Image (tube, grey):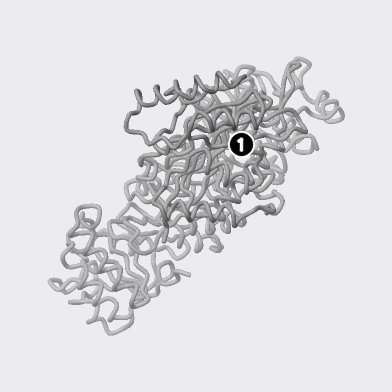
């Protein structure tokens, strides 16, 4: 897969230049200086030779067969150079030239022509507007960045060429080797999905790191990322948003979803670790590249100072991991080796005057203890501290079966120790919080890898009834479904809906109320009104016919005053049921990733605090429960301090039913059940209000 791109035997540099500083010169020089052992073919019609290599007037003039052609020519000459390269046998083309779709419509059209040419000839295209690529396995620096990085096990995909150069500089400074680095530029052909597939099976790559500004094909990305993360960690820094997050939305779910939530949900579904900054991208990558995965989340901290140890312990707990304790036997054995004043709790404090031996004694004990899954070792520079010697002792004590992350805090005084850690291949962080977050990423990924197989429940539903309502609405041009039709669809999918009737006149309203039995609720029905209660269109707990008559008139007067253009279909009379906790569940269909489910508490929790969680459909029972746990208000659902909780399983089933509905009907763009009234365990939740937005998908 992408063999001609990563392992070419013959490379043409089209636009090779004699002048240092020119892109065509620097690419050729990088290939030569880096030690690439294949054949290099400089192409320049105005030069006989460059850097001691014979030049050719065009790729076609070369008397052999090309594998890879790197084009560094002005925009207007790129298409012809691509045609010539393909005639010379090239199976992969890299266009580093800029000025295509990122510039204007003319550039976009030219880019389309180049991509179409390559696709028609079964040639893979990288770029345009990219830095090139690097493969340390064959010493190929086919880019105009700096020197060839050290060989390592991290591979990088970047949509930004500038970040590629920064990555190369950072890895050189940390002596952190790379396997491959690919700048994907405009992604006219080769994109993140192609590279995930290739790097997932690349023997040199242990960790895949990515910087992405957008994702070209959402569903394909999820599939490729899921397959990749089953084999190795994938860490991605995602920046920017798309038009998906900026479009108008009529539901709470749609308003709160946005593009960034969709990416977060996609990463969660596929096991991708999301970095929230450029720094954390490499903090995580370093840990994954150098240490084994933890078998659990029990963390032991070893420190020579109380404050940093407490910071680390706080961070571990806040991150949802466990601050573990040494077993009694381990603590007893270690007590004989450490000073009396040393603390054997967690953190294990080896005291400020600790020598390398104390660190190794504590580290060896922690590695042998069955209560410990991962270890953070902290060192601060006291007058008697020996950072370099301690670092060597720590590195020499590693067993390799549990992750150990070091945190040598300070600057000049600990620098020799940090250099020793880097040389020994041990991850080092300058602050406890950074080490904790890197370890949390490892724990989350290990947990995702060990999760049970995904089993999506299919409920028995009346799909035909829902289909009739949706089809008829679309045929009549109605894309906004109000409460009545939305509830009918939800009822077909197993939701409990209070009994109710649509009334057009006062007489019908009173008759419906008498039939249902008091108390009842009254709600205005209009496809043009989203927030009925804001306009006086909702009345609850109505106790008699006289009140029904009064509110029927009053409701219509208020609506005509506040929304004179609204089309009124009538008033919905509904049986009042027992009250409970209000939650909101919904769905917004992201244009890239498909149906995205939302959950949150009602009222201020969703309106003001925006305390909601998202997950891509379809969801399993466990994923639905995880959606509840992901909210800050989860403890309210569970019940605390004498308060009774609600039926969590019932909410999770509701999310799964919405998931099935959204999967069955791609015509549903947005859906809100707001609120779903949930009671104590064993009670059945019911839909108090709902709405949907449809789209005719042809």
Residue 432 appearing in the image: no
Residue 239 appearing in the image: yes
| The furthest residue to the bottom | 63
**Residue at 64% over, 23% down:** 519
Quadrant (top left, top right, bottom left, bottom right) of the C terminus: bottom left
Please tell me which residue lies in front, 682 or 106. 682
Please tell me which residue lies in front, 498 or 353. 498
**Residue at 26% over, 81% down:** 62
| The furthest residue to the left | 46
Indicate the position of residue 313 as horizontal and vertical percent values: 65, 24
Quarter holding residue 15: bottom left
Q: Secondary structure at mark 1?
A: helix
Q: Is residue 147 above or below residue 71?
A: above
Indicate the position of residue 90 as horizontal and vertical percent values: 33, 76
For this view, does 391 lie left or right of residue 453? left
Q: Residues within 10 Å of mark 1 (few under 14, many from 20)?
A: many
Q: Is residue 539 above or below residue 423?
A: above
Q: Badge 1 is on which residue?
A: 440
For this view, does 348 lie left or right of residue 528? right
Please tell me which residue lies in front, 165 or 118. 118
**Residue at 72% over, 51% down:** 452
Indicate the position of residue 529 as horizontal and vertical percent values: 41, 33
Indicate the position of residue 309 as horizontal and vertical percent values: 63, 22
Quarter holding residue 63: bottom left
């Amino acid at each position: 897969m992408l063999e001609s791109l990563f392992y070419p035997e013959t490379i043409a540099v089209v636009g090779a230049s004699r002048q240092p500083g020119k892109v065509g010169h620097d690419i050729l020089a990088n290939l030569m200086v880096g030690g690439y052992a294949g054949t290099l073919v400089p192409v320049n019609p105005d030069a006989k030779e460059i850097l001691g290599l014979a030049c050719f007037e065009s790729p076609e003039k070369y008397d052999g067969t090309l594998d890879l052609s790197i084009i560094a020519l002005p925009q207007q000459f790129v298409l012809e150079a691509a045609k010539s390269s393909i005639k010379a046998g090239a199976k992969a083309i890299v266009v580093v030239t800029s000025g295509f779709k990122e510039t204007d419509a003319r550039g976009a059209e030219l880019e389309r022509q180049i991509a179409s040419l390559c696709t028609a000839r079964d040639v893979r295209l990288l770029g345009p507007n990219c830095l090139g690529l690097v493969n340390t396995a064959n010493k190929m620096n086919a880019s105009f960045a700096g020197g060839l990085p050290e060989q390592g096990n991290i591979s990088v995909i970047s949509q930004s060429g500038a970040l590629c150069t920064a990555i190369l500089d950072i890895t050189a400074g940390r002596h952190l080797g790379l396997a491959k680095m690919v700048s994907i530029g405009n992604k006219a052909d080769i994109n993140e999905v192609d590279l995930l597939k290739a790097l997932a099976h690349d023997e040199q790559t242990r960790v895949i790191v990515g910087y992405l500004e957008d994702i070209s094909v959402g569903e394909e990305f999820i599939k490729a990322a899921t397959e990749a993360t089953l084999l190795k960690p994938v860490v991605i820094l995602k920046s920017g948003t798309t038009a998906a997050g900026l479009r108008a939305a009529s539901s709470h779910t749609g308003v709160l979803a946005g593009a960034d939530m969709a990416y977060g949900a996609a990463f969660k579904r596929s096991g991708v670790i999301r970095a929230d900054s450029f720094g954390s991208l490499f903090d995580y990558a370093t840990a994954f590249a150098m240490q084994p995965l933890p078998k659990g989340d029990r963390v032991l901290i070893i420190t020579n100072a109380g404050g940093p140890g407490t910071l680390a312990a706080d961070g571990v707990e806040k991150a949802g991991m466990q601050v573990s304790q040494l077993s009694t036997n381990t603590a007893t054995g270690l007590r004989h080796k450490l000073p009396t004043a040393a603390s054997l709790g967690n953190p294990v404090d080896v005291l400020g005057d600790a020598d390398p031996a104390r660190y190794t004694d504590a580290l060896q004990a922690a590695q042998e203890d069955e209560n410990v899954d991962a270890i953070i070792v902290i060192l601060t520079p006291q007058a008697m501290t020996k950072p370099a010697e301690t670092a060597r002792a720590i590195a020499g004590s590693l067993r390799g079966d549990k992750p150990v992350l070091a945190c040598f805090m300070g600057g000049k005084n600990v620098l020799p120790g940090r250099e020793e850690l880097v040389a020994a291949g041990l991850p080092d962080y300058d602050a406890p919080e950074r080490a904790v977050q890197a370890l949390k990423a490892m724990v989350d990924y290990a947990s995702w890898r060990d999760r049970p197989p995904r089993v999506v429940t299919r409920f028995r539903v009346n799909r035909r009834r829902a289909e009739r309502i949706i089809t008829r609405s679309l045929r009549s041009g109605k894309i906004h479904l109000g409460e009545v039709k939305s509830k009918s669809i939800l009822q077909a999918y197993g939701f409990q809906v209070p009994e109710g009737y649509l009334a057009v006149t006062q007489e019908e309203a009173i008759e419906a109320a008498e039939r249902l039995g008091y108390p009842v609720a009254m709600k205005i029905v209009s496809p043009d009104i989203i927030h009925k209660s804001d306009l006086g269109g909702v009345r609850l707990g109505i106790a008699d016919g006289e009140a029904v008559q009064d509110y029927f008139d009053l409701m219509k007067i208020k609506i005509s005053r506040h929304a004179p253009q609204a089309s009124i279909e009538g008033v919905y009379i509904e049986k009042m049921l027992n009250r409970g906790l209000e939650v909101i569940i919904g769905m917004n269909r992201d244009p890239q990733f498909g149906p995205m489910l939302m959950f949150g508490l009602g009222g201020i929790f969703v309106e003001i605090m925006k305390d909601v969680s998202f997950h891509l459909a379809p969801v399993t029972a466990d994923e639905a429960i995880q959606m509840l746990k992901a909210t800050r208000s989860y403890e309210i659902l569970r019940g605390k301090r004498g308060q009774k909780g609600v039926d969590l399983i019932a909410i999770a089933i509701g999310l799964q039913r919405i998931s099935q509905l959204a999967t069955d009907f791609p015509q549903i763009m947005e859906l809100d059940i707001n609120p779903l009234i949930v009671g104590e365990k064993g009670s059945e939740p019911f839909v108090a209000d709902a709405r949907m937005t449809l789209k005719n998908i042809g």
